[in-house]
């Protein structure tokens, strides 16, 4: 309803000054919503839940299934079993995209189409403001990081004909599945142990890139210690030199200013085709979506053309809502807290290591530390922590899969101080670790 | 809270007979919820929205992010930007699955894991009760039908080494994208025009299957007229004979008893590896998920191992909620209405055809009819229908892509009477079609 | 947001025809909401839940507590403990009214003030359309029917100095409490038994009205058989003759066209000051509000000036939402069903009476019938029905309070077929009655 | 569902340790809810919104209208127009109480009855813990403070025969309306100006109490400066001496430890029959309910017997939810912040007074200060503040009604720093006051 109409209605009923006040209030409430739809930027100040809810309702009210006059004779018309079922999709019952084009406007779903554009633009703006100012296009995908890797790789297969993926070893199933899903062959690049750290063997990498036909590279910025981030700047330079596409799996790297700076340098210094990040690990979204950004607009268009069908709108609206709820200022605060928590985690683990006669592994990681558990039953300690309601620590037994190398010489436990964690999480988890490890 | 406790609390306050009555009421309300969790079947009577909401809350309350005492030190801990953002995921903030295993129990998410098992079992039971009693395993995937085709094909590539997909021609982008995403080569099987109908050229198909190595077949049961369903029984027999995996894209075929009977016969008579159906087109779910069933349990396990990462729970809970909301009895009623609407659509189009000097195409299709628009500007009529708020008709100009053949000799418009459509939809849409076509 | 703005935003993103379609959809969705706010009438067609929700959000968004820029330095500023607590009030945290003026615009709450005006107008329009076309003003009160009687009586005490209330005997506590709360003396008018019916003794009534100073009359249209409705037309004539205010307790009479006709005649033929009706018993609202209408505008103003303080908005918005949800057409259907259910109730009870050797009492009542239970333990049967999950029957033992007379010669059970009941309610309840009474 | 059942269900699906973890989580989540229902105390730690929502759902699910098997044949059966309408009442569609007994268990509404008992007990416990440990019974009423005054006075009229109410002058309409609604005569006790303060003339009060038959006293603890609190201890002693009931209108006094101490002393030292407080002004509830407590259990029973009918459950559940949301610890923090804000308000107003050549009135008030506006157009300044989005200041022109005395020698503006206000409210409001007053 427009201003004139609200005025007219109010004026019939209540004193003019009250009417004006009522309009001022609703205008102020809606101003940030309007701003989001018009400017599509990562806002400085977050929106309230009421504002987000209003925005979602306005948008989903534009889809044709809301039209009381519509006659619907397609095979798929966003008919929904009950109001509750529709509410589970925030009423975006048509989903997003057209068959095989994730970002294409869907004629039946003007609102969802607009929503997705806003999500793409807002996510890109957030990534740019948080460090990757040299990216040009972005998309919020309704699938996991690993699946987004598959979408990007499949797009590259189709468009530039890659056949293999050079992948500096990371002991993580999802990206491997992503490579396999795209029908590509993984060429694992071995790692080396340097001090406590496990790093990609850059010599081997260069050898591989120089003699593999039709390949792309998948590099990783964030994984558990003792694995360290791949040197994306060096890798990007080599990719440029050999004209090989580079995809950076930046799963939870957005929270780290240092990592974001490295990626920006990599883009400036060499070739980077896509940077993929989890929406939940970086932006406090429920699990399910990812953000893919690129310095090259066409790559994002290719990715959009790779999802096979119309998709659930849920991961996209969740990501958009989370981005808008947080906003730039609160994100900077969350980053600050994350660094404080990380320092606290380090300190606590150092004390525990000393008490237990263990060692903190000397590994650079933006959110995590690992403490050795040599001579202890690390699997049993992990199980006990789980039962003691500590979630998320990673217990790896010497020699087991997980260290991204063969023969890592320690058992260890990793703990994270990732964005959004509370000080109490760190305090309680480390206290319980000590309790369980010293039993 | 258990019965004894509710009793104790009520007895302190209110007369004993009232307390008993209160307990009876809450028990009756929860009985179908209990039943769903225990028996995991497609219920005869649907659940109410209140019951569904309670079920969802009970389930999502078991995930660790709800534990007030938990210390969370993983890199991903279902931390969510705000309560509204969590509500967009029905509070299943951990998503579903473990990295690269869609159906694997997730230790941080007991509730979501249980939910997904219940969804898989309930969906399978629904498909079995609605015709495919000879399927043995099923999974609700959090992706579109086309993407599910990709997951199934990719699993077959990994497990049995397929390289090519024989695909009787359907002019639809999504499945082609699914084949491409899996990194497989599509071998298009040509169609023939027989009378008005466009059908797969079975002779060509047999020729292809007999001389293509390492292939699978993707057959289709539901598409727009003039394309007719593929003869899945004959194809399954050939697949059995040549030992080739057969995937049936049954996009919106669940609603049709006839098609379900054909598929059941195909399973009995030959080889069928997977049957894939849209959850929204068959079960009034918001767009975003699919149901894959199979007579072979291991195939479903392979598919579950193909999604690369943890996934959004939203499409799964939406599908489960829609299945439970409808229930078997209402589904049978919806099917009955669908057949009545289809008859009405046929009748109205026959009258219009006569008035306009056009013809109803004689094509078997479980939900749709096509009327010729020869000599008219069919694209313009389609655009006018859109503006007249008729959604879903498909206008194809003679010679244009869309008829699943070259040189189809008519322009035509397709209208659907799919499950969930109302009588008014058919009446209004056909009335407007006549108005716009006779202008 | 106004049209131009929505257009501008949509046009930036999606094709022009889609943008137009999206705007058409949201406009169509909002049209009935707009209509409600502009015209404030009982709509012919009810609004959907989504439309109601949007309307409530728009309205509550105008209250100052939603203004992000407001500086709030009163002692009461609609600060609320949590979002969930606010949601329990549909975010009308300021309540309604100013101290001691229920309908006065509240400067801090433009939205709630508007909402209440709309509620008052819509309720009046509904009552007028459903029969009392000769009423002129109305108010939705946030209190029960009995409390509304107190408000009306207290207003009459203040404005015209009444001291006593002539009250044809009804064995119901609430109205008596209403009279007492207003500090007035109840003068009970006795009843007489005529056949099976219990009716006011009109001769005694005339005697009382002719020799009581400063009194008002409280007459009743709906109560349980064997009590019949008061003859409001005759009473209104006497009230006119003696210049005595008449209040009609029309608790659940709106559903009955016959009773509404009688009240309209009473207004035309004599003096009626106020007609009070329950919102829940007539309009399927949760318990808690009432509707007071009057042929005299000043009376409603007086009532509004009698509530001592600002009130909860909840009963008012619930009443408004129920009125809008139903609309005139569905109300007429509900009335039709009510009459059918009533006929069915009569028939079933006649059969049961015959089988049990009992009798259906011959009493005119718009929604209920009573069956004798002579020689049976009627209290025990009532208790058994309660345990058998039949709610609402009224079991009265011969000689006990409840028949609105001394010495009523039967034990009996009353059952209702009131508006909103389902056929199954009647069937099940009567079947269980027979079962329990014949044990 | 009980533990064993949850276990059984989980064990069928997921590993035993996960099942245990899931149960632990849901148990921890529900533990505070259980505690509320069992112990009915003002909890130390507040409940989360999710916990509150679950509690409300459990409770409202016990009312008979939720029973799918119920046959409902009463004239009022909590039938509701639509799910959204029911949600506006948190599904407590039966309301609370029986006709004319607010706290009586309602056989159709086991859940609402339990809810109300819990609300009464929790509210009493809160009031006791926050200072009035010598009160014995309490009730949450579904009406405003002024209406609750009417209920208490009407109960006293019925039970002990009071006819008049001695009321130390307060220029506030609601309580006067409450006295009038109860049909009682107000005897206004004059005030005196002492320094800046306006206080009850205690000599006149004693004269009145000593020679008024059948009266009660209504004293006030919280009003706007320059009016100060009544000396409740002295008044209670006089009430004891003359055996006159004393009702204390403690509208927003719960937040003030000092006022609560005075009332406690008054109860110990003399006669106090009821203490009435607003739920919204003290406990951040939406406007609409009150809390009445008493050192005498029978008085609360009388009050419960005075409301004429069944009432809306909304104000009661809102009050209960707010109490539980806050909890004792957060309440103490809010009190601390209130005192800080009050100090800040004083400081800012002192500075402004000096700049403007005005004076801060020297009046004791727990939440407010008044600044003189002599020689200025105070009404115009008030209007400008309203337009400048400052809500709540009270602008009184010299000689106008509002000072609780004739001839108060100043114009002035009152600002509050009440519980729940933010520091920014005070800062912005005082800054705008200076701007507008110095224009």
Image: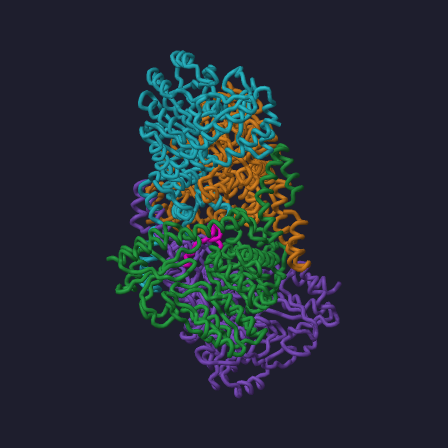
Chain colours: A cyan, B orange, C purple, D green
Quick one: D344 or B371, which is closer to the camera? Answer: D344
- Please say whether residue D151 is visible from this viewpoint: no
- Please say whether residue D26 is visible from this viewpoint: yes
Residue C436 placement (x, y as % from top left): 72, 62
Q: Is residue C76 magenta?
A: yes
Residue B274 placement (x, y as % from top left): 55, 30
Decide: is D287 above or below A35. Answer: below
Residue D333 placement (x, y as % from top left): 47, 49
Q: Residue furthest left?
A: D439
The answer to which image quadrant residue B19 occupies is bottom right
In the image: residue B53, left or right of residue D394: right
Decide: is D247 above or below D415. Answer: below
Residue A381 placement (x, y as % from top left): 59, 27
Magenta span: chief secondary structure: loop
Numbered disc total: 0
Query: Which region of the structure is painted magenta?
Result: C75-88
Decide: is C7 above or below C117. Answer: above
Q: Is residue B330 magenta?
A: no
Quick one: C353 or A353, which is closer to the camera? Answer: A353
In the image: residue A11, left or right of residue A163: left
Quick one: D172 or B197, which is closer to the camera? Answer: D172
């Amino acid at each position: 309803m427009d201003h004139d109409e609200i005025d007219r209605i109010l004026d019939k009923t209540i004193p003019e000054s009250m009417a004006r006040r009522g309009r001022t209030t609703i205008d102020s409430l809606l101003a940030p919503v309007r701003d989001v739809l018009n400017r599509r930027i990562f806002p400085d100040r977050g929106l309230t839940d009421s504002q987000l809810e209003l925005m979602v309702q306005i948008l989903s009210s534009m889809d044709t299934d809301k039209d009381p006059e519509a006659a619907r004779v397609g095979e798929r018309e966003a008919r929904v079993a009950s109001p509750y079922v529709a509410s589970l999709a925030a009423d975006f019952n048509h989903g997003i995209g057209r068959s095989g084009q994730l970002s294409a406007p869907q004629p039946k779903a003007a609102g969802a189409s607009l929503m997705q554009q806003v999500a793409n633009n807002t996510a890109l703006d957030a990534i740019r403001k948080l460090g990757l100012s040299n990216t040009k296009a972005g998309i919020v995908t309704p699938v996991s990081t690993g699946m987004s890797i598959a979408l990007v790789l499949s797009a590259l297969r189709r468009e530039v004909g890659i056949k293999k993926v050079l992948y500096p070893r990371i002991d993580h199933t999802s990206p491997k599945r992503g490579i396999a899903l795209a029908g590509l062959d993984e060429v694992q690049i071995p790692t080396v142990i340097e001090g406590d750290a496990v790093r990609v063997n850059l010599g081997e990498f260069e050898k591989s890139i120089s003699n593999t036909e039709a390949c792309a590279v998948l590099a990783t910025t964030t994984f558990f210690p003792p694995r360290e981030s791949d040197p994306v700047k060096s890798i990007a330079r080599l990719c440029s030199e050999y004209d090989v596409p580079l995809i950076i799996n930046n799963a939870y790297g957005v929270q780290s200013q240092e990592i974001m700076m490295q990626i920006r340098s990599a883009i400036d210094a060499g070739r980077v085709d896509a940077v993929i990040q989890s929406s939940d690990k970086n932006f406090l979204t429920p699990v399910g979506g990812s953000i893919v950004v690129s310095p090259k607009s066409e790559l994002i268009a290719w990715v959009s053309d790779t999802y096979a069908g119309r998709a659930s709108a849920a991961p996209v609206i969740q990501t958009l809502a989370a981005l808008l709820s947080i906003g730039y200022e609160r994100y900077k605060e969350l980053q600050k807290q994350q660094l404080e928590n990380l320092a606290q985690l380090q300190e606590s683990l150092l004390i525990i290591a000393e008490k237990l006669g263990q060692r903190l592994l000397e590994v650079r990681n933006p959110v995590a530390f690992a403490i050795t558990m040599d001579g202890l039953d690390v699997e049993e300690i992990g199980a006990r922590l789980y039962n003691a309601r500590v979630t998320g620590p990673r217990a790896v037994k010497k020699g087991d899969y997980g260290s991204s190398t063969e023969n890592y010489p320690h058992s260890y436990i990793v703990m994270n101080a990732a964005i959004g964690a509370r000080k109490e999480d760190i305090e309680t988890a480390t206290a319980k670790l000590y309790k369980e490890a010293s039993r």
